[in-house]
Image (cartoon, rainbow, N blue to C red):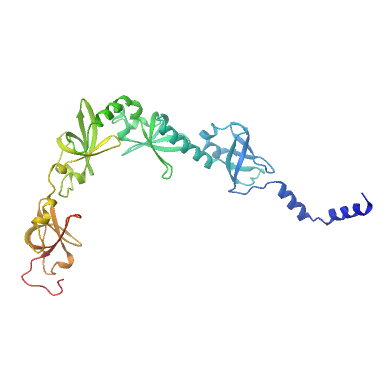
Amino acid sequence: MTERNKKKKKKSRQSQTMGDLLTKVNEEINIPQKGDELLAEIAEITPNRIYFNINAKTEGVLFGRELEQVSDFVNTLKVNEKVAVVVGQAEDPRGQILLNLKNSARKYAWNFYNKKMKNDQPIVVVGLDQNSGGILVEAPFNLTGFIPGSCLGANWLNKEEQLKGKKIKVKIIEVNKEQNRLVFSERAVSEAGKIAEEKKVLSKIKKGDKLKAKIVKIAPYGLFIEVEKNGVVLEGLVHISEISWQKVDNLEELYHEGEEIMARVLKKEDGRLQLSIKNLKSDPWQEVIKKYPESKEITGHIARITSFGWLVSLEKGVEGLIHISKIPASKKVVVGDEIKCFIESVDVDNRRISLGVVLTKKPIGYK
């Protein structure tokens, strides 16, 4: 090298500032920031810590609560395996880069449940608490699931409280990642043979079949029933909207537990029968258009008084509305009063009849 070139190189080194050197170092050494998602290689797994190679000035580390929350997922990992991590803290007081595995653990967990459900494989959960609908459980990968009361075997009937803290073998019947929802069935494990028989009998029942059923429970929203076929007991529900063509407010005034009823099959859903009592009777609205032509005068009875008008009972299962705007200010009624009215319009599809009051004198402002 000539003397001139040596001087030139020396001058070039002298012209580099400290800022230039720091920039060069930063380019060569990755400096992660909080929230960064990185693909890291597992360098070491100990009982209390996991170390990751993240190509930074120091290793990334996972420990403490962040490790406890993903312990089930960590048990599936191996040294040298690459996994997505998120930087929780770029540098703690000890100079460590703190990481978390929540995103990877969550993704793995939902894939795990989907696969188990698809393959109809059981898992073990732990009972947490009881509510009116069933049992909350702790599921693998730090998730909470639910066992509906109807998905508990007969051995646990009225003993749900004993499931708290108990390991329960279940099968997965619903996985919904978006709603963070996991639903399990204990009965699918403990009464698998019985369920197979039920499915066999259920497959022979068709929509429209008329069945004899026994009421086993009365709820505000419907009747829980049992149907016995070929020695197998099937469960079902008659929703309150399927009880009568008339509005029903209190089922306990009409039925009692243990009573036998006849009902028609509407559909089969989740191994249960959905039934109707009112479908055994003709729909009174099928004849409404013929019986109540426009402008016909008719006598009814006040069924309800609401903020938007009076509901008038014309016959069993058929009501009409006198809108508030059509009621004379001087007209006063109470429930049960007889009232003379006329048909303004009939909407069979939406089950609506608009009525007007028969007046001896047309009041001012009546439309």
* Snapshot quadrant of residue 127: top left
Residues 323 and 158: in front is 323
**Does residue 192 appear left or right of residue 141 in this picture?**
left
> Quick one: which residue is furthest to the bottom in this view?
364
- Measured as percent of width and height from the top left, residue 1 is found at 92, 49
Asked whether the viewer can see residue 218, the reply is no
Asked if residue 294 is positioned above or below residue 257 in the image, the reply reads below
Asked whether the viewer can see residue 198, the reply is yes
Which residue does the image show at 57% across and 38% down from the upper left? 64
* Snapshot quadrant of residue 165: top left
Residues 189 and 128: in front is 189
Quadrant into which the C terminus falls: bottom left
> Quick one: which residue is furthest to the right in this view?
3
- Measured as percent of width and height from the top left, residue 82 is found at 60, 37
Q: How many marks?
A: 0
- Measured as percent of width and height from the top left, residue 198 is found at 27, 29
